[in-house]
Amino acid sequence: MTNIDLRGLNPAPVTPFTATGEVDYAACKKLGAWLAGIDGVKSLTVLGHAGEGTFLSQSEQMKVIESFAEAVNGSIPIIAGITLEGTEVAAEEAKRAVEAGATAGLLYPSHGWLRFGYQKGAPQDKYRNVYEESGLPLILFQYPDVTKCTYDLETQLEIAAQPGVFAMKNGVRNMRRWDTEIPVIRQENPELQILSCHDEYLLHTMFDVDGLLVGYGNVAPELLVELIKAGKAKDYPAARAIHDKLLPVTKSVYHRGSHMEGTVALKHALVARGILDNANVRSPLLPLAEGAEVEIADALRSAGII
């Protein structure tokens, strides 16, 4: 079991772009340094959904990892999203991440499984091979229950027990499964670090986890650190108060037509906080409707974040 400690807040940074569409590596460094400087932030997960990782070329992906690694200067780990579909190409992607400075990898399910499901044993095989080929410690990524690539309990337990797997990012988004499966995973593998990625359901999942791995960590890291502390202390009134304070931000960022719109909203929020200069995204993401930036800034203001 790795000694990487993610017990706290683990933001998944966005990837900034210039006005002409190139990756803004200087802005990556600024964002990474700011997040790393906040007490309670334990790592940064780059090239995830919030980071538009699958929209980047291989060379851009490498440079993004390098930029964030340079920004944190060894103070916290950099975790890289490993997103390619085939096992061998995912292993090569993991090797590139190691070369670029990643400390661990968040291994995505093969995207074909989203539509068609997976063969029994295939996810275990992918985790095993990617770790053996790259040596990169891996985080088990549990997708939402509404998808066909959500892992059943048996699959989760078997992946979690494999060498190199040290944490789980759980976004099952089915509270019945959460309430019944998390205690079993805890009992069977007490060393596994369990992280919620339920950006829009933080209160319910806060009392069962070691920390959060969320895009939300881009814009409200200070309050999310306090929310994690309240959850670990089993202090429901304190956790509820922080949840309610954040609710306008949660609604303006995540209660949209598509969860992917949250990435665009995160960038607007970072502009409002003075961390980014613009909210540019890369196709197939599109800008939000006119006035969204005002709504998002107002929500941040109401939560006392700006």
Image: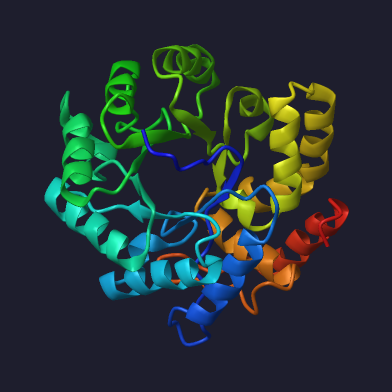
Taking the view exactly as shown, the residue that stands out farthest to the left is 88
Q: Could you tell whether 258 is left or right of 163 in the image?
A: right
Task: State the image quarter where residue 299 is shown.
Answer: bottom right
Q: In the image, residue 34 lies at what x, y percent?
A: 65, 66
Residue 10 in view in this figure = yes
Q: In the image, residue 111 lies at what x, y percent?
A: 26, 45
Name above or below for residue 153 compared with residue 4: above
Q: Could you tell whether 25 is left or right of 245 in the image?
A: left
Q: Quadrant of the N terminus?
A: top left
Q: In the image, residue 289 lies at what x, y percent?
A: 63, 66
Name above or below for residue 184 compared with residue 67: above
**Nearer to the camera, 43 or 249:** 43
Q: Could you tell whether 44 is left or right of 107 in the image?
A: right
Name above or below for residue 242 compared with residue 79: above
- Residue for point 33% across, 70% down: 62
Q: Quadrant of the C terminus?
A: bottom right
Residue 142 in view in this figure = no
- Residue for point 45% across, 15% down: 181
- Residue for point 83% across, 42% down: 245
- Residue for point 53% across, 86% down: 19
Q: In the image, residue 145 lies at what x, y percent?
A: 41, 27
Give the color scheme: rainbow, by chain, secondary structure or one colour: rainbow
Name above or below for residue 197 compared with residue 208: below
**Total numbered labels:** 0
